[in-house]
Structure formats: structure tokens, C-alpha cells
Image (spheres, rainbow, N blue to C red):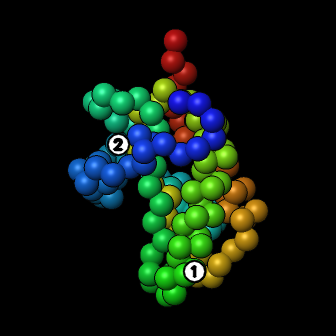
Amino acid sequence: MKGLRLYKIEKLCSETAISRLFARSDGSVRTALAYPLRMAWRVDSSRSVTVPRFLVSVPKKRLRHAVDRVTMRRRIREAYRLNRDLIPRDLPVDIVFIYVADSLLPYAKVQSALRRLLAKVADSVPPQS
């Protein structure tokens, strides 16, 4: 995959993969918090595609207006699109970003938080040889 666009293969759509990320009993799911984002990730070596896949969640409980939820979802996706090179491209990891702030925050704060979270994913994965 070339360029900076988001490809369909990078979006987490599988219901089973999403439910595994939100399952509390599974010990393979790791979480991290960098305000205003919380992240949960899981390395899924059983799948055939070895590309990081992600999902963005902005709860209605946090932002009541749909316009605000869509705005934050777009800001998070844009920050991921521009900073996804911080994690290896051949890593089969499923990631979910959950927005935890109660108000709209500027793109710069979202981007710095997302960079910190992606660095944690990159540090937690052992180097492949």
C-alpha cells in the first residue's frame, strides 16, 4: 500500500474481532490511556492479513451532539492516517481508539495523544527478525 490514504483493509469491521477487543475476560487485550483517548489493542496472529486495523469510537455519553461526534471521529482518523507509520506495517494488530473527553478538543491534542499511544504499541511488540 502506497500513499497516505486509508484503505479498506486497514479498517476494523469484523464483529468477532471487535467483540474480542471489548471482552474483559481475554488476557491478550492491552489498554492504554493518553487523554483524550483510550486505546485497546490485541495482536491477532491467526488472521491472514498482516496489516494493522483500527476502529474509532466516540460515545454518545461523552458528546451528545452527532455533529461533535463526527468531528472528533474525523480528527482521530486523520491523526491515525498521518501517524500510522509509528507502528510496523506488517504487524497483525487490532486497535480501537475510544474518545474519553467530555468536550471537543483541538486536533493538536488528539494528534499528540495518538502519537503517544501508537508509540506504546510499537514498544510492546517484540522486534521481528
The extreme top residue here reads: 129
Q: Which of marks 1 and 2 is in front?
A: 1
Residue 72 screen position, x and y as percent: 59, 70
Task: Name the element at disc 2.
Answer: loop
Q: Residue furthest bottom?
A: 64
Q: Where is residue 18 in the image (x, y as percent from the top left)?
A: 31, 54
Is residue 111 shown to the viewer in this render?
A: yes
- At x 58%, y 35%, the residue is 87
Above/below status of 64 relative to 118: below
* Secondary structure of residue under mark 1: helix
Camera-nearest residue between 71 and 98? 71
For the point 23% across and 50% down, the residue is: 16
Q: What residue type is labelled 2?
A: Ser
* Tag 1 residue: 68
Examine the image and state in which quarter residue 119 appears.
Answer: top right
Q: Is residue 72 above or below residue 96?
A: below
Q: Can residue 123 be seen in this view?
A: no
Judge whether 112 appears above or below 68 on screen.
above
User: What is the number of the mark on residue 28?
Assistant: 2
